[in-house]
């Protein structure tokens, strides 16, 4: 059993862990975004409430806990691999980055250090806001559509969601790009395809998410 442990301790192993957990989390955000767009259907309130009930009742109520445990594990491993890689690169370069290196590093890549923690803070707030209702003054259990609209109605809350989706955009953009590189598409001939995929995926997911708080602010969802 030494081989898997050695792989996990190596930089390559950690990059693979980051890529695989990144795919799992990306698929989750894609599905979550698509689920949220049901709010725009003519019977959006009914559709969203039914969808929420369906998720909660999946496999007699155990399905949602499998999904939650899987997501928690994926986030934990993603952060663990990132910290492992960062500590390794600091140990290799104890004096830190020179100004030139810093300038050369691509903005989206450097942004991972702050978009990651902001997203983590957003997720904690988001769960307390729209899942448990702890931070939602008008929360009603099971009324997903109503909770969404009343929860995003205060302008600062809607703006916070929009800002967080901006961070998600940077994170997904660079994440998708790095993931494809780790998984073998590092040859320059794939450069355009990697760029295109990262941009299309990011715009699709974050654009879809951001439509909801924008529509609440504009009074389209009420
Ligand atoms: C504008 C953006 C977003 C909106 C409007 C939104 C909306 C919602 C709503 C309404 C729920 C409650 C669903 C229910 O009770 O059935 C929910 C749950 C959740 N959202 Fe979001 N969401 C957004 C972005 C995100 C993002 C970016 C993530 C992760 C990176 C995320 C992760 C989650 C998680 C983990 C849950 C809890 C699922 C559960 O365990 O019950 N959301 N979201």
Image (cartoon, rainbow, N blue to C red):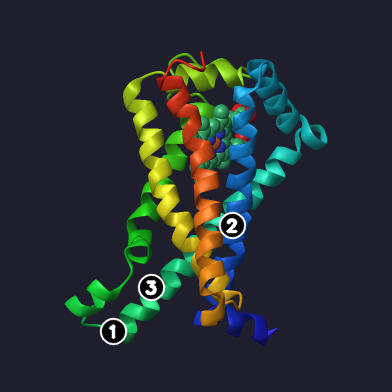
Reply above or below: 175 against 39. Answer: below
Q: Residues within 10 Å of mark 1 (few under 14, many from 20)?
A: few
Marked residue nearer the N-terminal end (1 or 2): 2
Q: Is mark 3 within 8 Å of ligand 1?
A: no
Residue at image position (71%, 46%) is 66
Give the farthest residue toward the right.
59
Relative image position of residue 127 (x, y in whole percent): 50, 34
Q: Residue at x 58, y 73 (%)?
A: 16
Q: Which residue is mark 2?
A: 74
Among the two numbered marks 2 and 3 on one chain, the one whose residue lies closer to the N terminus = 2
Q: Quadrant of ligand 1?
A: top right
Left or right: 78, with 46 as reference point: left
Q: Is residue 91 above or below residue 191?
A: below
User: Sequence-wise, which precedes: disc 3 or disc 1?
Assistant: 3
- Residue 148 rendering spot, x and y as whole percentages: 52, 22
Q: Label 3: which residue?
A: 86
To which residue does mark 1 refer? 93
Separation of marks 3 and 1 at Cα, in angstroms: 11 Å
Residue at 58%, 51% (x, y): give it. Answer: 72
Q: Secondary structure at mark 2?
A: helix
Residue 96 at least partly seen = no
Question: What's the CA distance linking mark 1 and mark 2?
Answer: 29 Å
* Residue at x 35% of width, y 31% of height: 159
Quarter the N terminus occupies: bottom right
Task: Locate residue 7: give its quadrant.
Answer: bottom right
């Amino acid at each position: 059993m030494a081989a898997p442990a050695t792989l996990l301790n190596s930089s390559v192993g950690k990059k693979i862990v980051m890529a695989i957990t990144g795919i799992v989390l990306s698929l989750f955000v894609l599905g979550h975004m698509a689920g949220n767009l049901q709010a725009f259907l003519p019977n959006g309130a009914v559709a969203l409430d039914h969808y929420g009930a369906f998720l909660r009742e999946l496999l007699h109520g155990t399905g949602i806990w499998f999904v939650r445990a899987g997501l928690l594990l994926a986030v934990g491993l993603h952060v663990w691999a990132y910290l492992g890689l960062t500590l390794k690169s600091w140990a290799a370069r104890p004096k830190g980055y020179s100004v030139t290196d810093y300038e050369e590093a691509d903005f989206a890549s450097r942004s991972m250090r702050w978009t990651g923690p902001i997203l983590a803070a957003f997720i904690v707030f988001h769960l307390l806001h729209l899942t448990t209702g702890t931070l939602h003054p008008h929360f009603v259990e099971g009324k997903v559509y109503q909770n969404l609209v009343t929860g995003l109605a205060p302008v600062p809350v809607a703006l916070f969601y929009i800002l967080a989706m901006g961070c998600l955009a940077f994170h997904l953009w660079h994440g998708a790009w790095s993931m494809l590189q780790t998984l073998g598409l590092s040859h320059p001939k794939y450069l355009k395809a990697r760029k295109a995929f990262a941009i299309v995926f990011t715009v699709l997911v974050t654009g879809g998410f951001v439509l909801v708080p924008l529509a609440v602010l504009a009074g389209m969802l009420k």
